[in-house]
Image: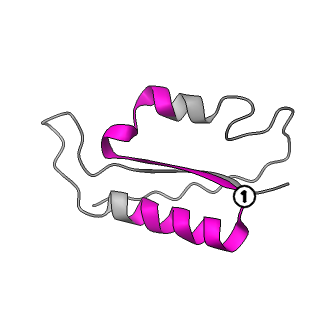
Amino acid sequence: MPFRGLFIGIDRYSSTGIDELTCARRDATALEALFFDTLGGSTVLLADAEATRQRIEDAFAPGRLRPRGYGGDRVLRPWVGDT
């Protein structure tokens, strides 16, 4: 099964109660490039304002990020953000 990946990096949230981050977008971009260059397949990168709830949900729609009738997939979920 070909690799499929969704990479999300948000440095600037719309909420004023969340401080601006400095590395999430960069790290998500680097991870997306690493996985795509190494494994090929299909990747989706959503950064900052592009990373809306709707776009994230759309990425999981059948036939997009995941093929129809998938099973036994492995999921890698790195947590990228400032502490």
Question: Does the segment drawn in magenta span residue 34?
Answer: yes
In the rendered image of this protein, does residue 81 appear above or below residue 60? below
The C terminus - image quarter: bottom left
Instruction: Please give the name of the residue rendered at 63% of the width and 34% of the height, measured from the top-left corner.
Output: 60
Q: How is the image coloured?
A: one colour
Determine crowd level at label 1: few under 14, some 14-19, many 20+ residues with C-alpha closer than 10 A: few
Q: Secondary structure at mark 1?
A: loop
Point out the residue furthest to the top here. 54
Instruction: Please give the name of the residue rendered at 31% of the width and 39% of the height, measured from the top-left corner.
Output: 49
Residue 64 spot, x, y in % from top left: 68, 36
Question: Does the segment drawn in magenta span residue 54?
Answer: yes
The residue wearing badge 1 is 41
Q: Is residue 36 left or right of residue 81?
A: right
In the rendered image of this protein, does residue 31 appear above or below residue 17? below
Q: Is residue 71 left or right of residue 29?
A: right
Amino acid found under the numbered disc labelled 1: Gly
The N terminus - image quarter: bottom right
Instruction: Please give the name of the residue rendered at 57% of the width and 29% of the height, measured from the top-left corner.
Output: 58
Point out the residue furthest to the left here. 16
Q: Name the dominant secondary structure of the magenta segment.
A: helix
Residue 36 spot, x, y in % from top left: 63, 65
Residue 74 spot, x, y in % from top left: 75, 53
50 or 74, which is in the foreground? Answer: 50
Residue 16 spot, x, y in % from top left: 12, 36
29 or 80, which is in the foreground? Answer: 29
Magenta region: 27-55
Q: How many marks?
A: 1
Instruction: Please give the name of the residue rendered at 54% of the width and 67% of the height, measured from the top-left corner.
Output: 33
